[in-house]
Image (spheres, helix red, strand yellow):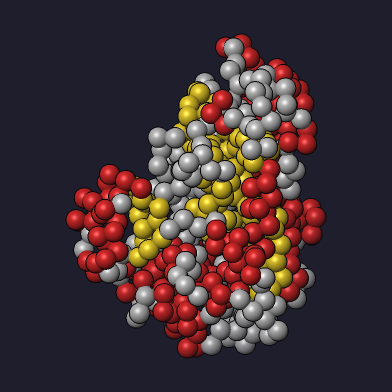
């Protein structure tokens, strides 16, 4: 694809490949992935207790073009978002009102209600660990406005629990740099140069946050607990964090499911230290499970979560920070004066304006006016519940029938959001065992950050630490690599 002007043309991406070129690039990409831990466990049930094979993660052959100025903006916004969500998580009255089981979403959403009710009981009992750790990811799409306006950056959601694919995103960026270095992509896009592939050091950045929490806990020989799902296929993304913690920080990790913790975890009555099996003390609890109701099939699973929360270990996230990531919070933040409540005294007005400009229109469905508005504008909307992990939303033409079937009392658990309109783009996508397929795609950028907060001084120690790109077929409403909708991708920075 030869450049036709200094302004990048998204609709002409990717360059056309011959069959032989595509075969070669696919071979280079898949063998690189298999050689560099860009891996998944195969889709078999049950997963063997000791894995004996792996497949490459789904991936894109070309990186996705992204305006350099908007990538810089997304990175710049992350520190403001880190501070914002740290402050939300420590504002008990706000979370009670928005997400609680008395006034808020928890009245009608059993999952949210269970978490909030347990958290309220623990607060009444007296929480012993004020510090909280967030490993965050803010997700964005490019938005093509009407009348040929310049592309803008719009937030999809903000993730406060199990923000995954940090380590695999780093390896995907390295994969595309390798393909460029080894083939120059056959000079099909002559303007491509090494500086257009931004560095990605997400693994070290996320581990820096976990290590900061471990140090703040103050017991050097303690370990970090990874709470994981049984049969997890995305295990390599987690293991690479574990290896980095050991190799760079001499911090050991224990992996346990909720079922294992029910049998192995205790909290001592004197110091409220969390201990696992052999009296190993835990400094930090990192949740890669616990974000979906299916992680809590029985009351005992909630009890196990509350046992961990009761302890002196630093939680990543705490229940409060998990609730802060709810879609209802995202929507309430768009209301007049709410953002200033959390940021107005310490963050410059220009930064607040930049953050607000990254939002699409949102509103609640708890009043009839909001429901009517959603019916009228259905073709331009997505409805979102308080869920993470993909596959939960309702889009466009499906909205009226969904609203007809939704009991009025349950409307408070949903928000309406204007759809982001990304520019036309193509890509070659490869899944294990399949040939590369060229399709029209949508690429979503995630920016990672961490924040350690909750101390007596109210300080927030935070940092922006890396990025992720997930690409899916344009006809797929849902995203998520783990749920099978998307592939891992990286960025080619362009001038738009």
| Figure quadrant of the N terminus | top right
Residue 37 placement, left or right of 333: right
- Which residue is found at the position 64% from the left and 79% from the top? 345
Give the percent coordinates (x, y) of residue 452: 67, 70
- Which residue is found at the position 64% from the left and 59% from the top? 77
Residue 363 vs 338, above or below: the answer is: above
Residue placed most toward the observer, 7 or 216 = 7
Give the percent coordinates (x, y) of residue 278: 64, 68
| Figure quadrant of the C terminus | top right
Q: Quadrant of residue 409?
A: bottom left
Q: Quadrant of residue 18?
A: top right
Residue 186 placement, left or right of 290: right
Q: Quadrant of residue 111?
A: bottom left
Residue placed most toward the observer, 27 or 82 = 82
Give the percent coordinates (x, y) of residue 3: 66, 23
Q: Is residue 256 visible?
A: no
What number of labels is visible? 0
Q: Is residue 155 visible?
A: yes
Give the percent coordinates (x, y) of residue 304: 47, 70
Residue 49 placement, left or right of 328: right
Residue 87 vs 163, above or below: the answer is: below
- Which residue is found at the position 61% from the left and 27% from the top? 61
Residue 157 vs 12, above or below: the answer is: below
Tell which residue pokes out farthest to the front in this image.
147
């Amino acid at each position: 694809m030869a450049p036709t002007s200094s302004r990048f043309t998204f609709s002409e991406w990717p360059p056309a490949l011959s069959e032989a070129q595509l075969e070669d690039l696919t071979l280079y990409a898949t063998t690189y992935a298999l050689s560099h831990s860009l891996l998944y466990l195969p889709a078999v049930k049950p997963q063997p207790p000791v894995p004996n094979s792996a497949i490459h993660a789904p991936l894109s052959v070309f990186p996705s073009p992204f305006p350099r100025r908007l990538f810089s903006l997304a990175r710049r916004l992350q520190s403001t978002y880190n501070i914002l969500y740290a402050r939300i998580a420590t504002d008990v009255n706000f979370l009670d009102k928005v997400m609680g089981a008395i006034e808020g979403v928890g009245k009608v959403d059993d999952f949210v209600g269970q978490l909030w009710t347990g958290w309220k009981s623990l607060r009444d009992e007296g929480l012993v660990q004020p510090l909280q750790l967030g490993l965050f990811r803010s997700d964005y799409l490019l938005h093509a406005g009407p009348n040929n306006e310049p592309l803008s950056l719009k937030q999809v959601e903000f993730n406060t629990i199990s923000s995954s694919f940090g380590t695999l995103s780093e390896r995907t960026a390295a994969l595309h740099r390798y393909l460029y270095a080894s083939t120059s992509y056959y000079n099909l896009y002559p303007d491509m140069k090494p500086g257009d592939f931004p560095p990605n050091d997400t693994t070290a950045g996320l581990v820096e946050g976990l290590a900061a929490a471990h140090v703040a806990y103050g017991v050097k020989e303690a370990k970090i607990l990874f709470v994981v799902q049984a049969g997890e296929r995305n295990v390599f993304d987690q293991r690479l964090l574990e290896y980095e913690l050991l190799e760079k920080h001499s911090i050991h990790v224990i992996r346990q499911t909720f079922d294992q913790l029910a049998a192995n975890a205790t909290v001592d009555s004197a110091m409220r230290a969390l201990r696992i099996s052999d009296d190993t003390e835990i400094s930090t609890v990192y949740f890669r499970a616990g974000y979906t109701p299916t992680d809590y099939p029985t009351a005992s699973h909630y009890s196990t979560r509350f046992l961990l929360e009761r302890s002196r270990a630093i939680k990543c996230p705490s229940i409060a920070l998990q609730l802060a990531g709810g879609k209802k919070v995202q929507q309430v933040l768009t209301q007049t004066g709410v953002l200033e409540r959390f940021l107005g005294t310490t963050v410059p007005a220009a930064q607040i304006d930049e953050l607000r400009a990254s939002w699409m229109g949102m509103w609640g469905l708890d009043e009839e006016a909001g429901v009517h508005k959603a019916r009228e504008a259905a073709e331009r909307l997505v409805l979102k519940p308080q869920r993470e992990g993909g596959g939960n939303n309702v889009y466009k033409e499906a909205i009226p029938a969904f609203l007809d079937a939704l009991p009025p009392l349950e409307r408070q658990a949903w928000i309406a959001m204007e759809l982001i309109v990304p520019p036309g783009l193509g890509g070659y996508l490869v899944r294990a065992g399949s040939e590369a397929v060229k399709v029209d795609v949508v690429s979503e950028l995630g920016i990672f950050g961490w924040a350690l907060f909750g101390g007596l001084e109210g300080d927030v120690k935070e940092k922006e630490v890396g990025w992720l790109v997930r690409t899916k077929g344009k006809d797929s409403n849902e995203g998520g690599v783990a749920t099978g909708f998307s592939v891992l991708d990286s960025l080619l920075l362009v001038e738009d």
